[in-house]
Amino acid sequence: MTLRPIDPADINRASLDKKPHEVAGMFNKVAHRYDLTNEALTLGQVHIWRRGVRIALNPRPGELILDLAAGTGGSTAALAESGAEVVACDLSEGMIAVGRQRHPELKFVQGDATDLPFEDATFDAVTISFGLRNVENTEKALREMARVVKPGGRLVICEFSRPTWPPFRAVYGFYLEEILTRIAGVLSSDDEAYDYLIESIQEWPDQERLGALIARSGWKHVQYRNYTGGILALHRAVRSE
């Protein structure tokens, strides 16, 4: 029997094993409508969350910052308004292609978060928004981020988390399983990818567990702040010397 190589174009959604070719293939398919769909699914909250990332990271003119899982570059452009030089890095060729069209002023680099194509101690800070959840090996990615950041450099992670108030948690669960899927079915170019989104959120560590993982992966002074009742958390840390 002859085995045919897997074509990323054949992949509708990634499995929770989060193999890089599956994740890249899934995002390649949704790239053109990704920003529009996310705007609708987050009810516009994405802009508030992005502002929170910028405040937590505190980018400064002249700094070199790595924006991982940058997608089409919306988060990168927001950080670059500070005067810092920001490099957008993403696994998906499709997302990068759309990003280069929308933000020709930005530098895009294709890369896997578990094997970054950068030298040691290159960046003053690193951030990743809604991407760590999609990485095959979370701890390896966190250590790679620590490797490419200078000693004392900063980390900010923006990721979905666990609502802290039980009644709100129940409402959020209903939204994920019933409402979000319907919106994605209308707006997205591939609603199966948003089935993966829901499953990956549900199995992701809560705020404390993620903080503990960060602390044992080359980072210190780990803190987090909840947004939107804990739907999302920003974790902040500093690279160990």
Image: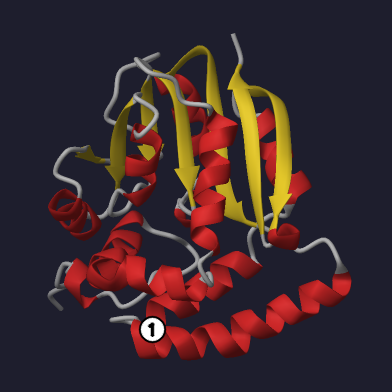
Q: Residue at x 61, y 21 (%)?
A: 238
Answer with left or right where residue 35 lies relative to residue 16: left
Relative image position of residue 219 (x, y in whole percent): 62, 24
Check disc 1 and report its element: helix, strand or loop: loop
User: Number of labelled discs?
Assistant: 1
* Res. 31 visible in picture: yes
Q: In this view, does 84 lie above or below 225?
A: above
Answer with left or right where residue 6 lies relative to residue 227: left
* Res. 139 visible in picture: no
Few, some or many residues within 10 Å of mark 1 (<14, 14–19, 20+): many
Which amino acid, mark 1?
Asp
Query: Which residue bears the numbered disc 1?
Result: 191
User: What is the quadrant of residue 32 in the picture?
Assistant: bottom left
The coloring applied to the image is: secondary structure
Answer with left or right where residue 38 lies relative to residue 240: left
Q: Which residue is drawn at 64% across and 65% down?
A: 203
Residue toward you, 85 or 7: 85
Q: Residue at x 69, y 85 (%)?
A: 174
Relative image position of residue 118 (x, y in whole percent): 29, 24
Residue toward you, 157 or 132: 157
Q: Quadrant of the C terminus?
A: top right
Q: In this view, does 67 lie above or below 218?
A: below
Residue at the extreme right: 166
Q: Is residue 139 above or below residue 198?
A: above
Q: In which quarter of the image is the N terminus?
A: bottom left
